[in-house]
Amino acid sequence: MFDKDSLEKIKEQKQKYQQKLETLTAKRPERQEKFVTDSEIDINTLYTPEDIDHLDYEKDLGFPGDYPYTRGVQPNMYRGRLWTMRQYAGFGTAEETNKRFRYLLEQGQTGLSVAFDLPTQIGYDSDHQLAMGEVGKVGVAIDSLLDMETLFDQIPLDKVSTSMTINSPAAILLAMYIAVAEKQGVKQEQLKGTIQNDILKEYVARGTYIFPPEHSMRLITDIFAYCAKNVPSWNTISISGYHIREAGSTAAQEVAFTLADGIAYVEAAIDAGLDVDEFAPRLSFFFNAHLNFFEEVAKFRAARRLWARIMKERFGAKKPKSMMLRFHTQTAGCTLTAQQPDVNIMRVAFQALSAVLGGTQSLHTNSRDEALALPSDSSVLIALRTQQVIGYEIGAADTVDPLGGSYFVESLTDAVEQKALEYIKKIDDLGGAPKAIEFMQKEIHTSAYKYQQEIESGKKIVIGVNKFQMQEERPKDLLKVDPEVGKRQEAKLARLRAERDNEKVQKMLQEIERAAGTNENLLPYFVEAVKNYATLGEICGVLRNVFGEYQQQIVF
Amino acid sequence: MSEKPIRVLVAKPGLDGHDRGAKVIAQALRDAGMEVIYTGLRQTPDQIVGAALQEDVDVVALSCLSGAHLHLFPAVVEGLQKQNAGDILVLGGGIIPDEDIPELKEKGIVEIFTPGTNTKAVINYIKEKVGKA
């Protein structure tokens, strides 16, 4: 990127600078012997044009909106429209969550993001024995279309976009969403939103799997095919590094394992007979925004460039949209401390800023009290306001990729990409992501343990935990889920099972069981069944009969 | 004098899939010389009790971040007592609000470790309570 003469001059001057630096540090040693990023990339004292001299602007950076999208997926990014401010929310019953949704929309939030409780995510109805104690805890309990109708009451589904953190039973929840929309008079082709639908990272890091990989992959490709035809604006998957990072991975591992999962989905869809440019434009991604600020910005840029190259070179994608890595970001829950929880507001703000400087399409900012409990209304409001300060007050959204061209950030972008590529190669050698689940788990655990050891040795500083501790009282106004939620859901289910046309439901379930054993697309069956108020647990139950259940390999 | 090492079952009751903390604790206990068995995810209280008996452990360390601890932790203690294994030390960890801790302790979970806990604190606590290794 620079002419030879000026590079030579810079080299000469840098030697002088190095000498000066050595004299200085001999007298006064630096704060640390070595500075490294979370991914263990060495950080130099200074970066100069020399460090990015190998970059080819056109080939490696390009213009925003153009391949390889390093600088962003849209030509003018946030100058046109800010990112979607989308707070993940859900707890208790559909009534309560509907109230929180409407509160957030009134406060200027621009998209919805549904958190489901664990029984819903694992395909059990609220009255199942394994659901005891878990109903409504980490999200809203959805058993049937009845709950889904309440959840979106007075929320126009042709106007908002909705993201649903649902994986194993994603196809069934999508079917319910389509059915609610229809009742509102909204056609499926008008629907906008995302289902997470990323099963591979469930096996690797998040744990809400139901079926074995091959059957899960079939459900996913069924969704790709159905949506390409019927719900064209729907993001059919959100390939997630977020939970991989939360489980303890480094930034480079986050990119690598996420994109390796992405490669597996693309391969599965192509194997199922789909054309890459038919489904790839609807793939989306989900990343973590962690503490190491510049490496995070570099990570987002590296992920975009790497994915574009994979789609073009490996899969021969032709449509620009197939090569664009669009992503949602959430700030890192695992960096929140129970100690001095208000300090979390600052952590979240910096993490959110890194996501914006990295070009995210949507963002969730965590609340300060999440290491203690589910967030309270007042904490959620501060979290949302943090995004609004970044968007409206500090000018961070006024130009595209403001850190592009920074010697340091470009050099880090390269380094993260390199490290991620090496991992992807390793996973390829193991036979692809579905065969590398235990490998990824081991790598993540090793990083997580090292992180903890560094905190305990004081090498990594966490304010309030191993430095600047204070005597303090824990905050008292924490949100508590009504312990009666489970009972209310059970009663609601009992009523539903008494009032619906059970004969019809049974017939629908038999149809699903039959179709699951063939290679027919299951989505139309799910849509019909949920419209007749078959429950999520009943549908997953027949699928469990046909597909079996995944048995976790314990890696530790 | 070579005493038998302390045996610990690290268990994930309920549907919660967050096991970063459980695995880090398990590794730290193992590095401290204890024999550690990790159950993996999605264990019912009955399964945990069964594993504790079968593995003949001194300690059961439960981890739950989903908010179902008030339901799940006491069920493990009860199960152990029913099997005449009430002497097994039961510890809990995870996102546990302060106000729930007295109830858990009353129901026999002897100590609760919340986010930010140093693994050495857990190691020392177990060594002191079990009094060997």
Image (cartoon, rainbow, N blue to C red):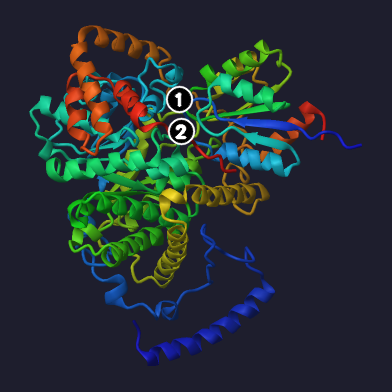
The residue most toward the right is B1
Residue B107 visible in the snapshot: no
- Label 2 marks which chain's residue? A
Q: Residue at x 64, y 74 (%)?
A: A25
Q: Nearer the viewer, residue A41 or B33?
A: B33
Above or below: residue A54 compared with residue A434: below
Task: Quadrant for residue B76, please give it.
Answer: top right
Q: Secondary structure at mark 1?
A: loop
Q: CA distance from mark 2 to mark 1?
A: 8 Å
Asked whether the residues under the numbered discs 2 and 1 touch, taking CB atoms below 8 Å apart as contact, a structural biologist would say: yes
Percent across and percent down for residue A542 are 32, 24
Quarter of the image with the C terminus of chain A is top right
Percent across and percent down for residue A182 are 11, 28
Percent across and percent down for residue B117 are 62, 37
Above or below: residue A268 compared with residue A16: above
Q: Residue at x 28, y 44 (%)?
A: A237
Q: Amino acid at mark 1?
A: Leu
Decide: few, some or many residues near mark 2? Use Cα within 10 Å; few <14, some 14-19, many ≥20.
many
| B51 relative position to A425: left or right | right
Q: Earlier in the sequence, mark 2 or mark 1?
A: 2
Quarter of the image with the N terminus of chain A is bottom left
Residue B44 visible in the snapshot: yes
Q: Nearer the viewer, residue B83 or A23?
A: B83
Q: Residue at x 74, y 42 (%)?
A: B32
Q: Amino acid at mark 2?
A: Asp
- Residue ID for mark 1: A478
- Residue ID for mark 2: A369
Instruction: Please determine if labels 2 and 1 lie on a single subunit.
Output: yes
Total residue callouts: 2
| A476 relative position to A329: left or right | right
Above or below: residue A90 compared with residue A368: above
Percent across and percent down for residue A123 are 35, 26
